[in-house]
Amino acid sequence: MESERKEKPGAALPMNIVLLEPEIPANTGNIGRTCVCTGSRLHLIQPLGFLINDKMIKRAGLDYWSSLDVTVYRNFEEFLARNPDCRDRFFLATTKARRTYADVHYPPSSYIMFGKESAGIPEEILLKHEKDCIRIPMAHNERSLNLSNSAAIVLYEALRQNDFGQLEKTGHLHRLRWPDEE
């Protein structure tokens, strides 16, 4: 499944979330919704633990799924071949990393990869990309945070470092007005 690129003229380059062999449809749906709300792209690397049309994905992503810029790849090698621009802005989120997600600079249009829920990113891939590995600090001896929470944490740090790109930074009340808006 190849999606159309939905960039607006003058828009900031989107961030990219990469899921390597995701297993739980609700996590992927939640991450898809986060990608839509942040103008980010989602890359799914097979095998997937569900069908793309799985009702759990659409349920978690609500009505956002149809607006998602998503591409599916047969394997990690195909992902790398089709995204050669990721090499200088590629980050692998893993509990095994030696530095945190806050210790790095995320250029515009960075690619942030997360592994499958049950095993993470294979160590063979991590060794080839050691300088690109990042972790979210957490309590000693705990396995990991939820995948969709982890993706949101790292993605928003990358967006913050880029002044949130073209995202709307201020909110407005629906029925009333803030005191300084009257």
Image (cartoon, rainbow, N blue to C red):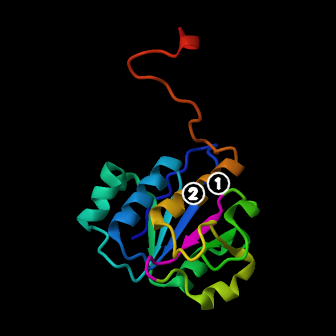
Horizontal and vertical percent position of residue 82: 57, 76
Q: Give the residue at x 46% y 51%.
A: 36
> Where's residue 13, x and y in %?
63, 53
* Residue 33 in the figure: left or right of residue 181: left
Q: Which residues are magenta?
A: 109-118
Placement of 90 over or under 151, stated as above or below = below
Residue at figure coordinates x 75%, y 63% from the top left:
103
Three-letter amino acid code of the residue under disc 2: Ile
All told, the count of numbered labels is 2
Instruction: Look at mark 1 in the image and give the residue it sits on.
Output: 157
Residue 19 lies left or right of residue 56; in this view the side is right
Q: Is residue 139 visible?
A: yes
Residue drawn 62% across the image and 66% down it: 136
Tags 1 and 2 touching, CB below 8 Å: yes
Residue 153 disc label: 2
Q: Residue furthest front?
A: 140
